[in-house]
Image (tube, rainbow, N blue to C red):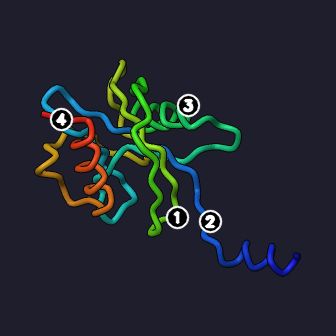
């Protein structure tokens, strides 16, 4: 039994829990963050969960910490796993509530982009945006 447990811990994939926000404007454009630490800087607003933190609270906290803006969750859209970065991400549809953007050490800019004209970013995130846009029937 001990060998089975040891082998399972060594060879089974381990994932971090993450959360992400999909925020669209009235024209169907997606809100993206310009990250200061990525090779491809533009991406979906996201972050990791703290221990004992509920996922919905995590995305609200992460968004506020990185921008100074409060968001509201409308609903859970999907959960995805990514082999490249070992994350299981819960993706929420959100909307902006209040606040003014303040750059942070992680996020230098935020901007809306047409979903058919996205900037250089991770391919997996582009695919996810396209999939979600079809599912929620954006204009």
Tell me the SS state at disc 3: helix
Identify the image quadrant of residue 7: bottom right
Judge the density around disc 4: few (<14), some (14-19), many (≥20) Cα neighbours within 10 Å: some
Write down the residue under mark 2. Answer: 14
The mark nearer the N terminus, 3 or 4, is 3
Task: Name the mark on residue 86.
Answer: 1
Q: Position of residue 22 (x, y in %)?
A: 33, 38
Say which label, 2 or 4, has the lower sequence index: 2
Q: Earlier in the sequence, mark 3 or mark 1?
A: 3
Secondary structure of the residue carrying tag 1 is loop
Q: 82 or 71: which is nearer to us?
A: 82
Residue indicated by mark 3: 57
Q: Are marks 2 and 1 in contact (CB under 8 Å)?
A: yes
* Residue 115, x across and y down, in percent: 16, 46
Q: CA distance from mark 2 to mark 4?
A: 34 Å
Q: CA distance from mark 2 to mark 3?
A: 23 Å
Q: Of the residues tagged 2 and 4, which is closer to the observer? A: 4
Q: Give the number of the disc on residue 67.
A: none
Question: Across the whole image, how many numbered discs are drawn on residues?
Answer: 4
Depth order, front residue of 127/25: 127
Mark 2 or 3, closer to the camera? 2
The percent position of residue 34, horizontal first and vertical second, equals 30, 49
- The residue at the point 37 percent across, 45 percent down is 107
Judge left or right: residue 81 versus residue 103: right
Within the image, what quadrant is residue 1 found in?
A: bottom right
Mark in the foreground, 1 or 4: 4
- The residue positioned 21% from the left and 43% from the top of the image is 134
Question: Which residue reaches farthest top?
Answer: 98
Marks 3/1: CA distance? 21 Å
Residue at mark 4? 138
């Amino acid at each position: 039994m001990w060998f089975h447990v040891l082998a399972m811990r060594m060879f089974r994939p381990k994932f971090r829990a993450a959360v992400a926000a999909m925020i669209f404007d009235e024209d169907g454009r997606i809100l993206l963050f310009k990250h200061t630490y990525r090779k491809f800087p533009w991406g979906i607003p996201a972050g990791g969960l703290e221990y004992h933190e509920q996922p919905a609270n995590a995305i609200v906290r992460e968004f506020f910490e990185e921008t100074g803006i409060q968001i509201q969750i409308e609903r859970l859209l999907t959960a995805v796993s990514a082999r490249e970065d070992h994350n299981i991400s819960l993706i929420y549809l959100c909307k902006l509530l209040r606040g003014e953007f303040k750059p942070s050490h992680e996020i230098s800019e935020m901007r809306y982009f047409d979903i058919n004209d996205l900037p250089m970013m991770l391919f997996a995130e582009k695919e996810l945006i396209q999939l979600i846009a079809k599912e929620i029937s954006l204009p």
